[in-house]
Amino acid sequence: MPSTWVHAFGFTLLPHTGGILAYWTNRKEITGWYATLKKPSWCPPNWVFGPVWTTLYTGMGYGSYLVWKELDGFTDKALIPLGLYGAQLVLSWAWTLTFFGAHRMGWAFVELLCICGTAAATTVIWYPINKTAAYLMVPYMAWLTFSSVLNYCTWRGNKDKED
């Protein structure tokens, strides 16, 4: 049986996998199509997104490890708390493909609303299991709120550039 630190490391790294793959498949769109969009004046520069997502994925990944550990692994008790987490994580990874890959800013906004809902449900269900894990989701929830507003404003200002 692997040691505790191996599990902690694995759970912490898992969210980065999808993020890296999504970035890798859409990197040309970031410097191409995305660069041509009208964005709000408060839109962060592109270099901010990498460190922010790295921090958020690390925090929520470690939080998922804490929940997994508290519930004694992948047990029946862990199905909903880790299932919700997994669902929001997959939606988060897919958002990049919807926004950058398909140029569907409106659908990406709808997807962000779904991510917000599943992430909020994850945070609420984690709280009685492990408060630290739930608190690790709070920065993610704040960023999702910001991202939703940014996505919406960018979509509204670029209706002509949506496929």
Image (cartoon, rainbow, N blue to C red):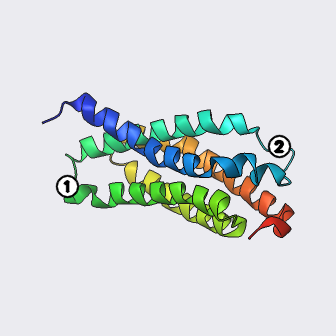
Q: Which residue sits at x=68%, y=56%?
A: 148
**Quadrant where the N terminus lies?**
top left
Q: Residue tagged by mark 2?
A: 42
Q: Position of residue 41 (x, y in %)?
A: 87, 45
Q: Residue at x 66, y 52 (%)?
A: 145
81 and 102: which is toward the camera: 102
Alpha-carbon neighbours of circle 2 within 10 Å: few (<14), some, or many (≥20)?
A: few
Classify mark 1: helix, strand or loop: loop
Count of labels in the image:
2
- At 32% from the left and 38% from the top, the residue drawn is 10
Q: Kindly report the distance in space between the C-alpha atoms of the residues bearing marks 2 and 1.
A: 44 Å
Horizontal relation, residue 154 to residue 133: left or right: right
Q: Residues within 10 Å of mark 1 (few under 14, many from 20)?
A: few
Q: Position of residue 120 (x, y in %)?
A: 51, 56
Query: Amino acid under label 2?
Result: Trp
Earlier residue among tags 2 and 1: 2
Dot label at residue 128: none
- Residue 65: name its quadrant: top left
Place of residue 43 in the rendered image (x, y in percent of width and height, measured from the top left): 79, 44
* Residue 116 relative to residue 12: left or right: right
Query: In which quadrant of the rendered image does the C terminus lie?
Result: bottom right
Using the image, determine if residue 143 lies above or below residue 58: below
Residue 75 numbered mark, or none: 1
Residue 117 sits above or below residue 35 on the image: below
> Mark 2 or 1, which is nearer the eye?
2
The kind of residue on which mark 1 rests is Thr
**100 or 136, which lies in front?**
100
